[in-house]
Image (spheres, rainbow, N blue to C red):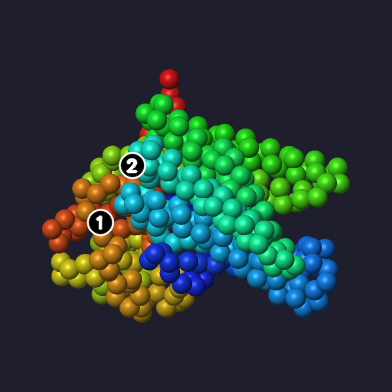
């Protein structure tokens, strides 16, 4: 539920119905790989070729590398879809790629198969490029040799048992099968992932002081893995608390509404300041018109509040911002994050029966989290 991680990505196409996106940071690593291969690797591997050929092969190698990463993520996605798990997108970014899988595996076996699909696909590509290199010569041989080597490294690196890498997901599937507890397995694998990430960071620092190459990259990769592992640990705790909780348990049933004919001054003084809520449904003759939040109010100059009506700036209601009282709170929270909303309307048989908010969910998590920590 952290889709904001890859904001700033552009969609470049679809494969198997999955949107393929490129994050702006990919351009940085594409340039670095092209430059390093064109100025160091290819001149040493194929010195007989002109400089222009080195640059062409450098750019081609960078493109094929990211095609390999996409293939790796598509392998995860293909197996996940076999288990009816939807894939939101695949994003290429500075550290490689990630498939944004919507939902969790139904059982440990599915988790294991989804996780190993990626490294197996990279091993497969490594073998293919190895044989292509063996049957080629000159610059083409050097190109395929590089791709064979880098795909082998990707496969091995992803098998490190640090969640949320593939090896960490394999570890989670093993713990899950043994303990019969998905949330415990996630937190345990995430904890191990954090320790491995810290090792990368400390080893990167050591490498810098020891004059060894790659220290900065090890630190950056460690930081990224640490952030991802910590987020996974926290999300597992959140999911454990909210698992099985229905919207009707947390929704606000006593709904305070605004009239569309009300001025902003009346809305602010009589509702926003009085109740302290961040937004209110707007109802016109029993029909839901939309929602007015502080965000819309702040866009209007203070001196204009007296003449501007609620109906002029409210956010018109959209059915995609509705949820049933029988749905689970996790789905409501995912919807809020996806649509960037602080509250959504709870509808039952066409009637508004409540309101569920991020603040309400946060209070529940705070209360239940404290209870869970008490002896």
Q: Where is residue 247 in the image (x, y as percent from the top left)?
A: 26, 47
Residue 145: % across, % down: 69, 58
Mark 2 lies on a secondary structure that is: loop
Residue 217: percent from left, percent from top? 72, 52
With respect to residue 158, does 150 lie above or below?
Answer: below
Q: Nearer the viewer, mark 1 or mark 2?
A: 2
The residue shown at (28%, 39%) is 244
In the depicted view, which residue is nearer to us: 81 or 117? 117
Mark-to-mark CA distance, 1 and 2: 24 Å
Q: How crowded is mark 2: few (under 14 residues within 10 Å), some or many (20 or more)?
A: few
| Foreground residue among 240 and 317 | 240
Which of the two residues, 25 or 320, is positioned nearer the viewer here? 25
Q: Which of 197 and 149 is in front in this view?
A: 149
In this orientation, does residue 285 appear?
yes
Q: Can residue 233 be seen in this view?
A: no
Circle number at residue 106: 2
Name the residue carrying label 1.
323
Name the N-terminal-most of marks 1 and 2: 2
**Residue at 65% across, 62% down:** 135
Q: Of the numbered discs in the image, which one, if any, rests on residue 246?
A: none
Q: Do the residues labelled 1 and 2 touch (CB within 8 Å)?
A: no
- Seen as rendered, the residue at the extreme front is 135
Position of 127 with respect to 337 (left or right) is right
């Amino acid at each position: 539920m952290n889709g904001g991680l890859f904001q700033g990505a552009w969609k470049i196409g679809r494969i198997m119905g999955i949107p393929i996106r490129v994050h702006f940071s990919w351009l940085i690593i594409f340039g670095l790989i092209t430059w390093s291969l064109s100025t160091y690797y290819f001149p040493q591997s194929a010195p007989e070729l002109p400089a222009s050929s080195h640059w062409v092969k450098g750019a081609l190698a960078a493109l094929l590398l990211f095609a390999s990463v996409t293939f790796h993520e598509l392998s995860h996605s293909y197996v996940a879809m076999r288990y009816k798990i939807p894939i939101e997108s695949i994003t290429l970014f500075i550290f490689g790629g990630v498939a944004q899988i919507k939902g969790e595996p139904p059982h440990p076996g599915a988790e294991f198969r989804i996780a190993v699909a990626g490294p197996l696909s990279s091993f497969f590509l490594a073998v293919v490029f190895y044989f292509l290199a063996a049957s080629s010569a000159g610059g083409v041989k050097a190109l395929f040799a590089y791709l064979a080597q880098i795909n082998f490294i990707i496969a091995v690196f992803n098998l490190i048992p640090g969640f949320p890498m593939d090896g960490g997901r394999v570890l989670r599937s093993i713990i899950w099968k043994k303990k019969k507890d998905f949330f415990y397995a996630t937190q345990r694998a995430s904890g191990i992932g954090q320790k491995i990430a810290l090792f990368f960071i400390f080893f990167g620092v050591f490498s810098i002081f020891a004059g060894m190459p790659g220290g900065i990259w090890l630190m950056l990769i460690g930081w990224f893995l640490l952030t991802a592992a910590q987020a996974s640990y926290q999300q597992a705790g959140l999911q454990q608390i909210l698992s099985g909780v229905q919207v009707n348990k947390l929704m606000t049933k006593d709904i305070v509404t605004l009239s569309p004919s009300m001025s902003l001054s009346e809305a602010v003084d009589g509702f926003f300041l009085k109740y302290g809520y961040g937004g209110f449904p707007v109802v016109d003759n029993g029909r839901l018109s939309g929602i007015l939040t502080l965000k819309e109010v702040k866009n209007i100059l203070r001196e204009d509040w007296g003449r501007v009506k609620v109906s002029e700036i409210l956010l018109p209601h959209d059915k995609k911002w509705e949820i049933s009282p029988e749905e689970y709170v996790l789905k409501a929270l995912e919807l809020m994050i996806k649509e960037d909303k602080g509250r959504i309307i709870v509808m039952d048989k066409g009637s508004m029966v409540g309101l569920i908010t991020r603040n309400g969910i946060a209070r529940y998590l705070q209360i239940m989290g404290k209870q869970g920590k008490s002896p």
